[in-house]
Image (cartoon, rainbow, N blue to C red):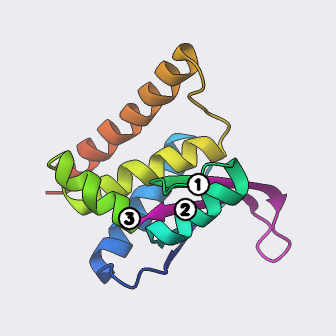
């Protein structure tokens, strides 16, 4: 299950709906069907504050993940944690990569979810593994979008 919070106040309803659907798809591919993730879209200032507080890096970043790893007594679902995304970084990166803002937000969301599932990219082997899984999820999403049209 996905909860999306738009603290930036800039996302269209269609983008929020699509992003939630794509994040849910990522959880299904990762066989995390009963898990819950909260996605928060915020700004550079917030990401810089969180990055400084929790990683010691005093600069804005595009995405941060915070593991919760607990059972939600209200839903009975396992709560994986929160993915916090900078809308400012996402907009800049979508322009740099010549992709839509939704596509960039999707990539960042999937990346954050992978971190919540225990993947990391601290060395070359783990980097290759994580980004291969990320690309696999993105490819499956593209196939699904193509099949719907």
The residue under label 1 is 58
Q: Can you tell which quarter of the image residue 19 is in?
A: bottom left
The residue under label 3 is 19
108 vs 31, left or right, is: left
Circles 1, 3 touching at the beta carbon (< 8 Å): no
Cα distance, mark 2 to mark 3?
A: 23 Å
Q: Residue at x 33, y 78 (%)?
A: 11
Where is residue 1 shown, x and y percent of the image?
Answer: 59, 65
Residue situated furthest top in the rendering: 125
Q: Is 53 a magenta residue?
A: no
Cα distance, mark 1 to mark 3?
A: 28 Å
- For the magenta stretch, what is the residue range? 65-86
40 vs 116, left or right, is: left
Q: Residue at x 71, y 59 (%)?
A: 53
Circle 2 packing at 10 Å, graded few (<14), some (14-19), many (20+), is some
Q: Residue at x 73, y 61 (%)?
A: 79
Q: Earlier in the sequence, mark 1 or mark 3?
A: 3
Q: Quadrant of the C terminus?
A: bottom left
Cα distance, mark 1 to mark 2?
A: 6 Å
Q: Residue at x 60, y 32 (%)?
A: 120
Please indicate, yes or no, whether residue 31 appears anywhere in the rendered image: no
Give the numbered dot on residue 42.
none
Where is residue 16 shown, x and y percent of the image?
Answer: 37, 74
When the figure is inspected, residue 69 is found, relative to residue 8, above or below; the finding is above
Secondary structure beneath dot 1 equals loop
When the figure is inspected, residue 7 is found, relative to residue 148, above or below; the finding is below
Where is residue 148 shown, x and y percent of the image?
Answer: 20, 56
Circles 1, 2 touching at the beta carbon (< 8 Å): yes
The residue under label 2 is 48
Q: Earlier in the sequence, mark 2 or mark 3?
A: 3
Q: Earlier in the sequence, mark 1 or mark 2?
A: 2
């Amino acid at each position: 299950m996905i909860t999306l919070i738009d603290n930036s106040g800039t996302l269209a309803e269609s983008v929020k709906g699509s992003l939630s659907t794509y994040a849910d798809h990522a959880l299904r591919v990762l066989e995390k069907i009963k898990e819950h993730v909260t996605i928060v879209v915020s700004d550079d200032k917030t990401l810089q504050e969180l990055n400084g507080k929790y990683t010691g890096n005093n600069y804005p970043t595009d995405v941060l993940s915070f593991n919760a790893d607990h059972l939600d007594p209200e839903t009975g679902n396992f709560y994986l944690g929160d993915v916090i995304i900078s809308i400012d970084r996402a907009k800049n990166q979508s322009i740099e990569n010549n992709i839509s803002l939704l596509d960039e937000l999707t990539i960042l969301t999937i990346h954050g979810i992978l971190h919540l599932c225990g993947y990391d990219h601290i060395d070359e082997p783990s980097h290759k593994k994580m980004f291969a899984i990320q690309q696999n999820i993105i490819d499956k999403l593209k196939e699904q979008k193509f099949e719907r049209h």
